[in-house]
Amino acid sequence: MKEEFTKFNLEDYLTTDELRKEYLNQVLADGDLEELKRALLYISKSYGVEKIAKKANLNRESFYKIFKPNSKPRFETISKILRAFDMNLSVSA
């Protein structure tokens, strides 16, 4: 008997703003830019990419370029995406 596995899609589990915020905080704590880009993409997918791109005032093509390996998105762009999530960046000690 062959077992079949379903593909795991993280964005399927980011169903509330609280879960999204906690996930993003954990990623930010690690300080890895590539992981941050993946997290922003997963969260965008959980909301709907087109909705977030439009809210961030980015066209779809530009939006996806941000997430390519070794891309270096500008802080302003990351900030726009966070605002589209109705989130902001804060610092605590």
Image (spheres, helix red, strand yellow):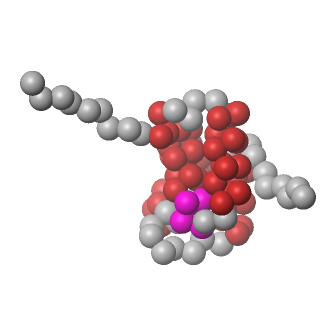
Which x, y percent locates residue 35? 55, 60
Quick check: 7 left or right of 33?
left
Residue furthest left in the image:
1
- Please name the residue shown 47% across and 33% down the image: 12
All told, the count of numbered labels is 0
Q: Is the magenta stretch mostly helix, strand or loop?
A: helix
Task: Read off the magenta span.
Answer: 33-37
Which residue occupies the foreground of this view, 39 or 50?
39
Which residue occupies the foreground of this view, 46 or 26?
26
- Please name the residue shown 12% across and 29% down the image: 2
Which x, y percent locates residue 25? 71, 49
Residue 2: in magenta span: no
Residue 10 vs 68, above or below: the answer is: above
Residue 5 vs 79, above or below: the answer is: above
Quick check: 73 left or right of 62?
right
Which residue occupies the foreground of this view, 66 or 56?
66
Residue furthest front in the image:
1
> Is any atom of residue 10 visible in this view?
yes
Which x, y percent locates residue 75? 70, 69
- Please name the residue shown 86% across and 58% down the image: 91
Residue furthest right in the image:
93
- Please name the residue shown 52% across and 52% down the image: 41
Residue 34 vs 40, above or below: the answer is: below
Quick check: 42 left or right of 23?
left
Q: Quadrant of the N terminus?
A: top left
Task: Report which quarter residue 27 is drawn in.
Answer: bottom right
Task: Report which quarter residue 14 is drawn in.
Answer: top right
Q: In which quarter of the image is the C terminus?
A: bottom right
> Is any atom of residue 59 visible in this view?
no
Which x, y percent locates residue 90? 84, 55
